[in-house]
Amino acid sequence: MTTQKEDRLVTLEEFIIQAQNRFPGATGELSQLLRDISLAAKIISREVNKAGITNILGYDGSTNIHGESVKKLDLFADSQLISALERSGITCMVISEENDGIVQLSSSGGKYIVYMDPLDGSSNIDVNVSIGSIFSIYMREPRFDQTLREEDALQPGTKQVAAGYVLYGSSTTLAYTTGLNVSLFTLDPSLGEFILSDRKVQIPDHGKIYSINEGSYNSWELGLKKYIKYCQEDDQESGRPYSARYIGSMVADLHRTLIKGGIFIYPHSKRYPNGKLRLMYECNPLSFIIEQAGGMATDGHQRIMDIEPTAIHQQTPIYIGSKENVSHVMDFLHEFAGKEEAEVEI
Ligand code: P6P
């Protein structure tokens, strides 16, 4: 029998205050930053859910730094998040997938740096598949002069003070961590509030779902080919073959992996020799979430969050998900490193 208190709804607002009150020295600035992001998320959610009606679908004719056509909703999400962060004056700069360089905010004295992918998976917008926003928050490194430089933002993922995502799907879900577990919230549009749905998400230690774009199979390294073949073998005792699931929207694939377990992989390939996904605003924040939920994330050689960044938009291969699944694919990569298909039959 749960007590009345446990039954009542807890809003994101209340949850943030409760978390802040556990740290008497807290200034409340990080709490405010998270509130800013959640406000922008509600506005973006409203637009995403009615994009089909307004003329906000489709391309705006520009391309981003990666040569990808930018959809109008991308720009809308980017501007909503930047203006929300600007309002509270505690963020000094934003690095976004939609902007080539750092975006210095009017609050140049702000103590936080925010990386974001304002609308990840945008190629799915006009086919009504789930898309998401991803954010990653760092403290600005103290320096004697107040000029803001790109180098200030080049910090490894281990220095994130908070990270999270918003998934615009059948419902709008917000997940975030400040390094003390992962909490999940679902937007109740009738209240305009994110309501707590899980205060401590734990990823299963093992899962029977693998998620990868098999279209690039021919350019994978041998160990990855062997691992995927292992997943596809018929072995009822070990629960194989696993299921293949690939949405093509990283936030959606990662959210499923967080909840159901398994592994998401975006490897290096001929087309993307350094991987396609961006270290600072896709891989690091989602790795922070997965690790805080008990999972694992590597680039095939080292922990994602240990990578020392050299560029704000740099890309990395990623193997992320349940600890046992990620450890297992790493074993295959190490066993067959440097070997070619001709040396062994697949
Ligand atoms: P591919 C979306 O464009 C994205 O950046 C991620 O959200 C997604 O995981 C990946 O690219 C999909 O890439 O090459 O499989 O279409």
Image: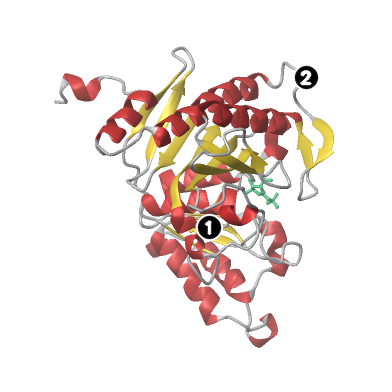
Q: Is residue 4 left or right of residue 205?
A: left
Q: Mark 1: which secondary structure? A: loop
Let me know if residue 200 appears in the view: yes
Q: Position of residue 108 (x, y in %)?
A: 58, 38
**Residue for point 49% across, 35% down:** 90
Q: Secondary structure at mark 2?
A: loop
Q: Residue 184: which quarter of the image?
A: top left
Image location of residue 104, percent across then percent down: 64, 40
Quadrant in which the N terminus is drawn? top left
Q: At x 66% / y 33%, what residue is drawn?
A: 78
Toward the viewer: 330 or 285? 285
How many residues crowd around disc 2 within 10 Å: few (fewer than 14), some, or many (20 or more)?
few
**Front in this rendered view, residue 133 or 37:** 37
- Residue 131 in the image, given as x and y percentages of width and height: 61, 36
Direction front: furthest residue = 144
Specify whether residue 212 is in view: no
Q: Is residue 42 above or below residue 107?
A: above
Quadrant where the C terminus lies?
bottom right
- List the single residue furthest toward the top: 190
- The three-letter code of the residue at mark 1 reads Gln
Instruction: Name the residue type under label 2.
Output: Asn
Q: Which residue is mark 2?
A: 55
| Residue 15 as seen in the image, left or right of residue 226 | left
Foreground tag (1 vs 2)? 1
The answer for how far apart the CA atoms under marks 1 and 2 are is 39 Å
Mark drawn on residue 92: none
Q: Which residue is mark 1?
A: 155
The residue shown at (72%, 62%) is 272
Q: Earlier in the sequence, mark 1 or mark 2?
A: 2
